[in-house]
């Protein structure tokens, strides 16, 4: 079976998941969107309201912000990337997912990564960094520098929701810093 088919099967299974209590309140399991052959994997925190309704990640306001940040460095969100979250079901009221919820959900992400075999992972926000890298550091300290994990280049960036709350594009501000971080991603992407 090709890894694309394996990924599709995995997603089918994932949509039935009842491993944690988020299954009781979700509308849809939000598995992924984008290109399964992409070299770049983007990982966010968890679905919000629009994602829960549609079943696709990053389709609400934060998603539009992510799209425009990627577009600004000529990365096509749906062609060049595969996009998912740490937890696949919406935490009620968009609260941060609990440690138990992350623990029960992360095997889905691990398997997605096995089948996708990405060269670059972009971690959007501190929950993604903490859950995926086991590093508890403010995102402002850790963003913008490459981290190597299992031969994959990992770039932490600010979460797009944070950029919505900090819209200034002035040099040194979060939006400008994210632009610098994504330029680094584009440079590596162009070299592979
Ligand atoms: N925020 C996330 O982290 N993921 C989404 O899918 C939407 C908003």
Image: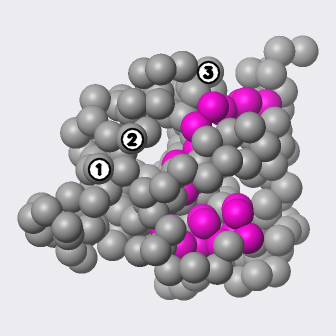
Q: Does residue 135 lie above or below 112 as drawn?
A: below
Quadrant hosting residue 192: top right
- What secondary structure is marked by label 2? helix
Q: Secondary structure at mark 1?
A: helix
Residue for badge 2: 184
Tell me what residue is drawn at x 83 percent, y 15 percent: 2
> Which colour scheme appears in the figure?
one colour
* Residue at 35 percent of width and 69 percent of height: 161
Q: Around disc 1, counting alpha carbons within 10 Å, would you say few (fewer than 14), some (14 to 19), or many (20 or more)?
A: some
Please give the range of residues in magenta. Answer: 115-134
Q: Residue 59, position in %: x, y?
A: 39, 51
Q: Quadrant of residue 165?
A: bottom left
**For the residue labelled by badge 3, is the local secondary structure a helix, a strand or a loop?**
loop
The answer to which of marks 3 and 1 sits earlier in the sequence is 3
Instruction: Point out the frontmost of discs 2 and 3.
Output: 2
Q: Position of residue 98 (x, y in %)?
A: 71, 83
Residue 168 horizontal side relative to residue 138, left or right: left
Q: Which residue is mark 3?
A: 37
Whether residues under marks 2 and 3 lie with C-beta atoms below 8 angstroms apart, the answer is no
Badge number at residue 7: none
Mark 1 lies on residue = 180
Assess whether residue 117 is covered by the magenta stretch: yes
The N terminus: image quadrant: top right
Q: For the view shown, which residue lies furthest in the top direction?
A: 1
Alpha-carbon distance for marks 3 and 1? Answer: 25 Å
Is residue 15 something one can see in this rendering? Answer: no
Mark 1–mark 2 contact, CB under 8 Å?
A: yes
Does label 2 or label 3 sit earlier along the sequence? 3
**Left or right, 19 with reference to 33:** right
Near-viewer residue (127 or 172)? 172
Instruction: Judge the density around disc 2: few (<14), some (14-19), many (≥20) Cα neighbours within 10 Å.
Output: some
């Amino acid at each position: 079976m090709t890894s694309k088919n394996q990924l599709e099967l995995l997603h089918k299974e994932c949509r039935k998941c009842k491993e944690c209590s988020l299954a009781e309140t979700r509308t849809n399991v939000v598995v992924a969107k984008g290109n399964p052959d992409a070299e770049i994997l983007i990982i966010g925190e968890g679905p919000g309201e629009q994602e829960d309704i549609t079943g696709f990640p990053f389709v609400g306001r934060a998603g539009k912000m992510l799209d425009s940040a990627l577009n600004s460095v000529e990365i096509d969100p749906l062609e060049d990337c595969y996009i998912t979250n740490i937890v696949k079901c919406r935490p009620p009221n968009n609260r941060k997912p609990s440690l138990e919820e992350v623990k029960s959900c992360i095997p889905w992400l691990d398997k997605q990564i096995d089948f996708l075999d990405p060269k670059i992972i972009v971690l959007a926000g501190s929950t993604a960094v903490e859950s995926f890298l086991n590093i508890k550091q403010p995102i402002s300290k850790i963003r913008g520098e490459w981290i190597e994990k299992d031969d994959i280049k990992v770039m932490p960036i600010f979460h797009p929701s944070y950029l919505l709350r900090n819209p200034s594009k002035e040099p040194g501000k979060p939006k400008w810093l994210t632009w610098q971080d994504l330029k680094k991603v584009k440079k590596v992407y162009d070299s592979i």
